[in-house]
């Protein structure tokens, strides 16, 4: 049995390796094909020119917009568009755009930006491709599962357009590297999924004077705005106070229909193309609200720049030094990266392995699962009590009575009942333990890393979602 | 004939008075505000001369959970940015827009 298990994991590993190599070879093929096509086009043009009376050099001088013959052919449908044309295309080819996040929003945004001919396209993301991303992060293919999203996205962009420059930043955006990275681009696209990143990116754009194309999507709704453009407001002008943690979940916690971030990501690409090519009227001082269920798009006029804004306001002293030292996780009470929140001291936490021992030793305890009930219905640990974090305060008496029952039954034996709290990834459980300890439940501890850690470290057959 | 006319004109005045002393606005909830109230929109009757702040107070009484997002919403009156002190008029549309962060 053991040996068979080893064999199959070896096969899986080799399969993954082969799939990646296949993807890389396919990418190389498409690059070479594009190159061949380009060379052939130039040769055709040369032949045509030598049949006439002018030399290739004269033609080159004639093309003062700077587009090569291959570019003219590739982008012809945009050149033929009267409101776009050769000038806008030329602007686009000279521009540089950074897309932060290669997820649900970034996927379509990147594909369209690569296809339309943005001169230099930067991609930054620290995550790897996972199976449960595929329904919305359409830039990635199964061959890249387990590999960096940036590598996968860059490969897809290159296979669409091998003639533009693509920068790969396989790293997390932090206050320590944000100024340096963002300063290399003309336009910034926020395609992230969490509040601290949104504030950090907006602040950084204010400091660097870069326009920010900001999109967001959750559930069946999306929002889109261009910030910090031509004297317009920044993200903080609009939302000076961060939302409470419960108001701002990630897609990974709340669910999202794949096409909803798809729609917003496409609109982000559109606004970016408008800015880069200098056509049309950007969505500045306006917010687009997309409601998928009712099939409605509303555009609301939002406030202008706030003179009171702590970052872009008249009396703001916010500078690069302050930015580098600003704690965005503390400001928003939200982790920049899934699973990295640290609210509790060591002694208020246990690992999933330690909890396994507690189960094996049959130590008296209560396991409180604070996930929303529709999560609990997907999968849960046996003998757990489900009280969602949002209802914990109002249902505290339930917990008290369950604890009391256990104490009564075991009145004569052993130490008092311990209380362990679990959630999906170990953030909400920390918030719950913090609240429980403040409310007198001194034995409350959270299980580090939640059910995902349980699945990773204790029971690999435990389903994750 | 005269009596009926008189009665109906009296009735009309009464309705008119009621209309001038209160206004009905449409409230639109977005994102988390929609989750917390459980409805995408509703009609709210307010005394005339009410501010958007007063409307929010009334909505929080109706849906206490809305308190959660009150400090971080953008308010738009008839699709334009508005402040707490703006007076709502009959048939105005008040949108309550908390930020979304997902992607
Ligand atoms: Zn501002």
Image (cartoon, coloured by chain):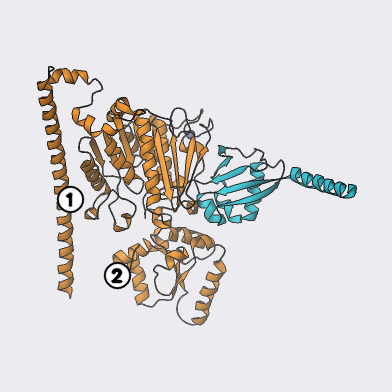
Chain colours: A orange, B cyan
Residue A149 percent across, percent down from the top left:
27, 48
Q: Which residue is mark 1?
A: A23
Q: Is residue A301 left or right of residue A59?
A: right
* Foreground residue among A201 and B93: B93
Mark 2, residue position:
A461
Crowding near the residue tagged with mark 2, few <14, some 14–19, many ≥20 C-alpha atoms within 10 Å: few
Label 1, secondary structure: give it: helix
Residue B12, compared with residue A207, is above or below; it is: below
Mark 1 or mark 2, which is nearer the start of the sequence?
1
Look at the numbered disc 2 and say if its residue's Cβ is closer than 8 Å to ligand 1.
no
Residue B35 visible in the shown view: yes
Q: Is residue A146 visible?
A: no
Do tag 2 and tag 1 residues touch (Cβ < 8 Å)? no
Residue nearest the observer in this picture, A114 or A41: A41
| Inter-mark Cα distance, 2 to 1 | 29 Å
* Vertical order, A7 against A85 (above or below): below
Q: How many marks?
A: 2
Q: Position of residue A224 (x, y in %)?
A: 44, 41
Foreground mark, 2 or 1, reads 1
Q: Residue at x 50, y 82 (%)?
A: A409
């Amino acid at each position: 049995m053991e040996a068979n298990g080893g064999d199959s994991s070896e096969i899986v590993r080799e399969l993954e390796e082969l799939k990646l190599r296949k993807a890389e070879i396919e990418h190389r093929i498409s690059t070479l094909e594009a190159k061949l096509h380009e060379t052939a086009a130039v040769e055709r043009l040369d032949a045509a020119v030598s049949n006439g009376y002018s030399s290739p050099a004269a033609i080159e001088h004639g093309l003062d917009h700077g587009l090569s013959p291959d570019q003219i052919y590739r982008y012809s449908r945009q050149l033929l568009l009267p409101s776009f044309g050769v000038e806008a295309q030329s602007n686009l080819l000279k521009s540089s755009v950074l897309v932060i996040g290669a997820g649900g929003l970034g996927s379509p945004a990147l594909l369209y930006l690569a296809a339309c001919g943005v001169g230099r396209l930067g991609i930054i993301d620290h995550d790897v491709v996972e199976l449960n991303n595929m329904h919305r992060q359409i830039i990635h293919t199964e061959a890249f599962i387990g590999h960096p999203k940036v590598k996968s996205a860059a490969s897809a962009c290159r296979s669409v357009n091998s003639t533009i420059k693509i920068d790969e930043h396989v790293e997390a955006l932090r206050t320590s590297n944000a100024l340096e990275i963002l300063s290399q681009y003309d336009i910034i696209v926020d395609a992230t999924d969490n509040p601290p990143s949104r504030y950090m990116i907006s602040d950084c754009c204010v400091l660097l004077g870069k326009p920010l194309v900001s999109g967001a999507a959750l559930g069946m709704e999306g929002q889109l705005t261009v910030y910090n453009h031509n004297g317009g407001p920044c993200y903080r002008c609009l939302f000076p106070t961060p939302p409470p943690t419960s108001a701002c979940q990630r897609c990974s916690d709340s669910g999202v229909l794949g096409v909803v971030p798809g729609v917003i990501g496409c609109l982000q690409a559109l606004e970016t193309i408008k800015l880069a090519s200098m056509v049309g009227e950007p969505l500045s001082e306006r917010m687009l609200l997309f409601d998928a269920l009712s099939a409605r798009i509303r555009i609301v006029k939002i406030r202008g720049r706030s003179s009171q804004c702590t970052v872009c306001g008249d009396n703001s002293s916010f500078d690069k030094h302050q930015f580098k030292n600003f704690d965005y996780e503390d400001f928003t009470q939200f982790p920049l990266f899934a699973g990295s929140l640290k609210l509790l001291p060591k002694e208020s936490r246990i690992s999933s392995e330690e909890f396994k021992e507690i189960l094996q030793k049959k130590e008296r305890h209560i396991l409180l699962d604070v996930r929303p009930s529709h999560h609990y219905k997907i999968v849960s640990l046996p003998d757990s009590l489900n009280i969602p974090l949002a209802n914990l305060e109002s249902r505290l008496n339930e917990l008290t009575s369950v604890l009391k029952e256990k104490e009564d039954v075991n009145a004569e034996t052993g130490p008092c009942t311990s209380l362990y709290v679990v959630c999906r990834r170990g953030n909400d459980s920390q918030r719950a333990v913090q609240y429980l300890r403040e409310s007198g439940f001194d034995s409350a501890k959270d299980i580090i890393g939640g059910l995902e850690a349980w699945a990773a470290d204790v029971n690999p057959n435990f389903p994750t979602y | 004939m005269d009596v009926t006319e008189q009665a109906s004109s009296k009735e009309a005045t009464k309705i008119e008075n009621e209309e001038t002393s209160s206004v009905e606005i449409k409230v639109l909830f977005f994102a988390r505000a929609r989750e917390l109230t459980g409805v995408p929109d509703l009609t709210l009757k307010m005394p005339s001369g009410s501010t958007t702040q007063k409307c929010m107070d009334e909505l929080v009484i109706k849906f206490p959970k809305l308190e959660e997002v009150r400090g971080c919403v953008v308010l738009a009156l008839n699709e334009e940015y508005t402040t707490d002190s703006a007076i709502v008029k009959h048939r105005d549309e008040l949108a309550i827009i908390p930020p979304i962060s997902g992607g």
